[in-house]
Amino acid sequence: MTNFSDLSNTMADAVEAVSTSIVSVRAGRPISGTVIGDGLILTVAHVLHGDEVTVVTPDGRELSATVAGRDPASDLALLRVDGLDLPALSASDGVRVGELLLAVGRPQHGVQATLGMMERQMTASPAEGDAPESGPRSRGWLPSGAAPFRGVSGGALVDARGGLVGVLNAGVLRGELLAVPVGLALKVADLLGRTGRVPRGYLGIATQPVMFPQAEGVETETEVETRNRGPRRGRGREGWGGGRGRGGWEPGGQGRWGQGGRVGLTIVSVEADSPAAQAGLLVGDVLLSLDGEAVRRPPELLWRVRERAGQSVSARILRGGQEQDVTLVVGER
C-alpha cells in the first residue's frame, strides 16, 4: 500500500506540473485562468466587466488578453492571449467516485491548492430515476469536494495524474467550490472560439411533474404480459403499458412517485410566440416524451433541449385524455 509520504509527494508533483498551466487574471477581482489550448484560457465570466484583461503567467510576465466570448449559463469566458507559450491541460481520462482531486488556482500571491474528492459520477444529463435537485447542481455543476479559497475561480480541478476534470467556480453556491465538467467546458470553449457565443435551445414552457396513479387492482399491459409470457424485449418502464416513448409506468410501487403510475410534465404556462406556442401547445397539456424518450422532471426537459437549438423534436402529449404527437422546432436564446 502506498504510504503517506508517497501520496503526499505524488500530490505535490501533480500541483507543480499543473501550476505551469494556471495563470492569474486581473479582472474585477483577482481570479485564475486555465490554459486549454494555444493562446487560449478559460476563466469565469461574472467578474469580467470589459473585453480586455491582463493575465500574469507563472514566471511573472504580464500579457494582454481579449475576451473572445462569454457563456452566462456555464459562467465561462474564453480569453485569447498573443504570445502565450504555456502548456495546455489535457482532459482527464476519467475519474471514479472516491478518487482524490486537486483544486489548483493562482491568486495574486502565487499558486495555491486544496484537496478534494470525486463525490459522484457526472453524467451528460440528469439520469432517469435520479432524485430531483434544484439550484446549481441540477444544471450540471460538479462538486469538487474541496474548500474554496480567494482567487480559485477559473482554476483547474484535476485528478492525481494531472488530467483536467473541470474548471472551478467559487461564486455559484455559497461556501462550496463547484466546477464545470471538462467535457462541457471544452465544448463551450470551442463554440466561444468559433462564434463568440453559445446558443441555448428552449421551448418556452414552464412545467411541473404529474403522476396518474394506477387504479387499484388494475394491471398494466406490461404486468399482464410478464405474468402470462414473461418479460418482452424492448418494452420496459416507459410507456402507458410498456410502449417506448409514452411516459413511464412504475409498477409495484418501486418508483419514487408512488405506488405505480405514469409520470409526465404538466404545462403550466406557455410563452407568447415561443416554439411551444407556435406548435400549438396549451396550458394543461401533459408532456409525456420527446423523440420517444420519457420526460419526468423539469430539469431533465431543460437538458434535453438546451443543445438542440434549431432542431425539430417530436413530442407526445396528453390532451383531454387523448394522446397525440406534436412536432416542435427548438428555439434559440
Image (cartoon, rainbow, N blue to C red):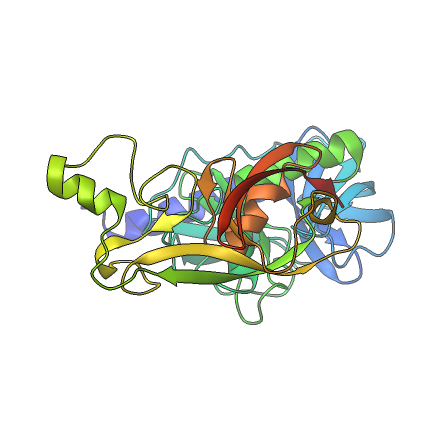
237 to 218, vertically: above or below:
above
Across and down, in percent, residue 215 comes to 29, 62
Between residues 100 and 17, which one lies in front from this camera angle? 100
- Apparent side of residue 304 relative to residue 37 in the rendered image (left or right): left
137 to 38, vertically: above or below:
below
Does residue 20 show up? no
Does residue 295 show up? yes
- Apparent side of residue 318 relative to residue 34 in the rendered image (left or right): left
At 75% from the left and 49% from the top, the residue drawn is 274
Across and down, in percent, residue 214 comes to 31, 60
At 45% from the left and 39% from the top, the residue drawn is 293
- Apparent side of residue 135 relative to residue 281 in the rendered image (left or right): left
At 69% from the left and 28% from the top, the residue drawn is 38
11 to 313, vertically: above or below:
below
At 79% from the left and 42% from the top, the residue drawn is 69
- Apparent side of residue 271 relative to residue 9 in the rendered image (left or right): right
Across and down, in percent, residue 88 comes to 61, 33
Across and down, in percent, residue 3 comes to 23, 50
